[in-house]
Amino acid sequence: LQSQICDVLGIQYPVFQGGMAWIADAELAAAVSNGGGLGIISAMNANGEWLRGQIRKAKELTDKPFGVNIMLMSPFAEEVAKVVVEEGVKILTTGAGNPGKFIAAWKAVGIQVIPVVASVGLARMMERSGAAAVVAEGSESGGHIGESTTMTLVPQVCDAVSIPVIAAGGIADGRGMAAALMLGACGVQMGTRFLVASECNVHENYKKRVLKAKDIDTIVTGRRQGDATRSLKNRFSRDFAKEEMNPESTVEELEKRGVGALRRAAVEGDEINGCFLAGQIAGLVKKEQPAAEIISEVCMQAEELLKGAAKWAR
Ligand code: FMN
């Protein structure tokens, strides 16, 4: 299964591994790239030197293209924006905001910029700013989310822009991938499914929770601070949701509560006080597998379904 985005980026399969703060390191990114997809290192809130180390490690582990995800809210965003240029990174995705002010400088050195967008308006703006493609991410996703679902967002973004569109949010198998291609996307980005890749270094408790999750086991918190975030239900997320309803708690108090919560889940495996970001599709993710196997399984299933699609219409 191939598409236009494979030619643009020089990858074998149109499958991105989404940036995941505290989780998507050089080892996961390299495993995905070696499996023919696009592995992505998460720059998250780390400083430039940490990122430089990860980029160099990924180069040792793979000779295939890989990317870096820059969180625009990071206090180190300006610093990591320079490091990716110095280290010769060729593909960037950006999350949590508008990368408009960086795009010209990145493009000037030949970097392909692929912003993650949750609305048609931002997708259009990114095309005008010179983005190579966009990831249209629906609210089924794990992590920070917008309002529209993947089913509604993807076709509207595809109609609005002429650059390639990658669909994200709620995709974890070939059925999801085939559906995304039918909606007009030319590839998919998965986060939740790659959380349980064998090469993913997230804490074992995190993987266990994703593998055990059912369809209704995620919750969205943070709407009051304008930072809606989807995670698995546990003590932390339920308490957070309760506090949000409490008119006496301030936005500052809520923000303070969230600090360090993803690290506690991803690094320490703290099932009580950690925030286990994951998407609604976690209920479908039942097996830990090497990243390469995940990619080929998803693509093969999608290809079979798309080939047979003509038979369904009578
Ligand atoms: N997206 C970003 O742009 N930057 C991040 O740092 C980031 N962190 C994430 C952490 C976790 C644990 C998860 C599950 C998602 C995160 N995302 C982040 C979103 C993913 O890159 C991806 O778009 C999303 O997971 C796709 O939806 P899915 O979880 O249904 O596959």
Image (cartoon, rainbow, N blue to C red):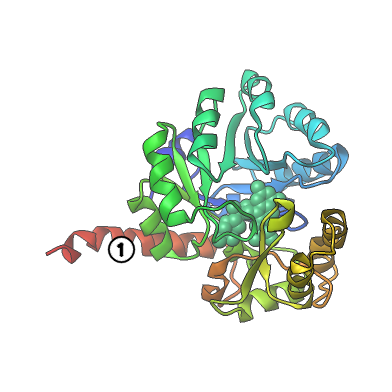
Give percent across and percent down for residue 38: 57, 47
Classify 218 as above or below 68.
Answer: below
Q: Quadrant of residue 51?
A: top right
Give the residue number, with chain letter if any, for mark 1. Answer: 305
Dot 1: element = helix
Q: Is residue 305 left or right of residue 166?
A: left
Quarter holding the C terminus? bottom left
Residue in view at x 83 percent, y 74 percent:
270
The residue at the point 57 percent across, 80 percent down is: 214
Return the residue found at the far front. 247
Frontmost residue, 4 versus 138: 138
At 64% across and 74% down in the image, what residue appears? Answer: 210
- Hey, what amino acid is under mark 1? Leu
**Image x and y of residue 205, in percent:** 75, 76
Q: Which residue extends farthest top? A: 108
Quadrant location, ligand no. 1: bottom right
Rendered residue at 70%/52% (across/down): 227
Image x and y of residue 209, in percent: 68, 77
Tell me if I can see residue 30 in this picture.
no
Q: Is residue 57 above or below residue 143?
A: above
Quarter residue 196 falls in: bottom right
Asked whether mark 1 and ligand 1 are closer than 8 Å, the reply comes as no
Alpha-carbon neighbours of circle 1 within 10 Å: few (<14), some, or many (≥20)?
Answer: some
- Image coordinates for residue 235, horizontal then vertical, percent: 78, 78
Q: Residue furthest left?
A: 314
Observer-nearest residue: 60 or 230?
230
- Residue 11 lies left or right of residue 70; in this view the side is left
Horizontal placement of 299 versus 130: left or right?
left
